Image (cartoon, grey):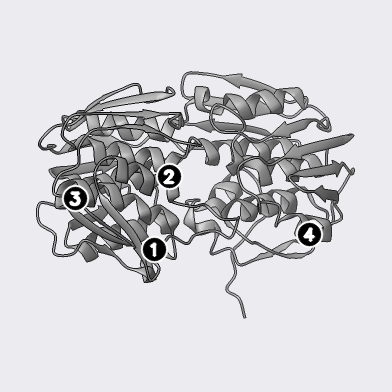
């Protein structure tokens, strides 16, 4: 099973094309969020060519520095154009972001950081408006290690005058991949992947040719698919070091997990054991794997507790899992899951991207037929998931709603 490129790495790299030069980006997943970002760049005046997993972008001239509500509401990652627009073009008007309904994800830290870099920032009528003749380097401390905030400020600082320090920066592999792509273009960045990122501003960036890292969330989803069905799954073209928080838990639950240089194989050994999981910023257990792990807990032997520390509304899949016979009690940021030998198929409704995947995994393990509606969420982040699961032996098909 070949893993696609990481959506959450591709999106900031695509947005960074606004900083100039010809950008050739490969291993880009063909998902709706990527299509939305390409539409946004094209709407601004960038030349965008998409061919399979290869995207070429020229943004030498743009005719708009506005990211309108109609596009941004579909994908909160659209806010990533804010930093590049401001740094290179001196102004940006970006709608406040939308995206999945998993709780508030404020952009306050982005705006406070840009203000420290010398921008005039205001929020009016649902739009962020920012201006700066040229940004100047500054020391920025993030109250929490926000991924998109770190990425936005890192891109903005690339063309700022002087040196910028981003402290308490996000350490995710996607942040490191963005930094690697920017360094290829002449950016001076040190420390990506650590608590402190140092950026020495330059006057301009050139183009680059960059391959997006594999999607660790997709890889983790397929490994759990193997575990929940008592199967044997090998995921190829992935980076095992990015999956350690997930593979460690799968080992604790009893699965055999073997890692090679660019692949991970999981072999299920009997019914998985219950255990406790707490989501946290990288290198902790990813919040984007919480719904999938909860589905596995539903059929595990014993009681599990899952604690969500990142988003306050990310248990919206719980009532749907309970429709399938799961025994789950939610108490604030904690969910107690009493594992059952089997689940039963039922019609369920997806509330967000990762909940969609969790419900599909539960359906793979359930007796009878499960129908998951509102799977348009799924297409935002998974490339042909039903085809890949079918290749692994699942009985799954996509049908149009009546």
State the separation of the CA atoms marked 1 and 4.
29 Å
Would you call the spot at circle 3 few (<14 residues within 10 Å), some (14-19), or many (20 or more)? many
Task: Report the mark closest to the observer, 2 or 4.
Answer: 2
Q: Residue at x 21, y 63 (%)?
A: 44
* Disc with the residue nearer the chain's start (1 vs 4): 1
Q: Is residue 299 above or below residue 137?
A: below
* Disc with the residue nearer the chain's start (1 vs 3): 1
The one of 127 and 361 positioned closer to us in this rendering = 127
Residue indicated by mark 2: 109
* Disc with the residue nearer the chain's start (1 vs 2): 1
Where disc 1 sits, the SS reads helix
Where disc 4 sits, the SS reads helix
Task: Report the mark closest to the observer, 3 or 4.
Answer: 3
Using the image, tell me which numbered label, if any, was put on residue 72.
1
State the separation of the CA atoms marked 2 and 4.
33 Å
> At which x and y percent is residue 114?
31, 45
Residue indicated by mark 3: 132
Where disc 3 sits, the SS reads loop
Is residue 88 visible to us here? yes
* Disc with the residue nearer the chain's start (3 vs 4): 3
Q: Residue at x 20, y 56 (%)?
A: 91
Residue indicated by mark 4: 319
Residue 374: image quadrant is: bottom right
* Disc with the residue nearer the chain's start (2 vs 4): 2
State the separation of the CA atoms marked 3 and 4.
47 Å
Q: Residue at x 29, y 57 (%)?
A: 38
């Amino acid at each position: 099973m070949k893993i696609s490129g990481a959506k959450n790495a591709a999106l900031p790299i695509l947005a960074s094309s606004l900083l100039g030069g010809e950008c050739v980006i490969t291993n880009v997943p063909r998902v709706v969020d990527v299509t939305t970002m390409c539409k946004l760049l094209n709407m601004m005046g960038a030349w965008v060519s998409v061919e399979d997993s290869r995207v070429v972008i020229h943004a030498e001239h743009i005719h708009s520095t506005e990211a309108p509500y109609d596009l941004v509401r579909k994908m909160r990652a659209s806010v990533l154009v804010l930093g590049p627009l401001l740094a290179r073009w001196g102004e940006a008007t970006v709608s406040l972001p939308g995206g999945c309904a998993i709780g508030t994800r404020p952009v306050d830290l982005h705006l406070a950081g840009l203000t420290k870099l010398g921008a005039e920032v205001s929020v009016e009528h649902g739009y962020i408006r920012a201006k700066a003749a040229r940004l100047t380097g500054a020391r920025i401390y993030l109250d929490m290690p926000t991924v998109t905030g770190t990425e936005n400020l890192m891109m903005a600082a690339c063309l700022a005058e002087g040196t910028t320090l981003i402290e308490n920066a996000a350490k995710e592999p996607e942040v490191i991949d963005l930094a690697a792509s920017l360094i290829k273009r002449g950016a001076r960045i040190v420390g990506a992947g650590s608590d402190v990122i140092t950026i020495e501003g330059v006057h301009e960036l050139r183009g680059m040719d960059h391959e997006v890292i594999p999607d660790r969330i997709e890889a983790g989803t397929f490994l759990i698919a193997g575990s929940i069905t008592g199967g044997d799954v090998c995921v190829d073209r992935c980076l095992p070091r990015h999956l350690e928080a997930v593979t460690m838990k799968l080992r604790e639950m009893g699965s055999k997990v073997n890692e090679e240089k660019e692949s991970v194989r999981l072999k299920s050994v009997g019914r998985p054991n219950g255990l406790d999981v707490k989501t946290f910023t990288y290198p902790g257990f990813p919040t984007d794997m919480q719904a999938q792990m909860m589905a596995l807990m539903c059929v595990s032997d014993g009681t599990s507790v899952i604690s969500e520390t990142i988003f306050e509304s990310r248990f919206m899949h719980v009532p749907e899992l309970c429709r399938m016979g799961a025994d789950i009690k939610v108490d604030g940021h904690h969910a107690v899951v009493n594992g059952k030998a089997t689940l039963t198929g039922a019609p369920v409704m997806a509330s967000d991207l990762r909940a969609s995947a969790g419900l599909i995994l539960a359906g793979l393990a359930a007796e009878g037929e499960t129908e998951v509606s509102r799977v348009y969420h799924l297409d935002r982040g998974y490339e042909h998931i039903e085809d890949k699961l079918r290749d692994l032996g699942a009985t799954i098909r996509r049908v149009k709603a009546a």
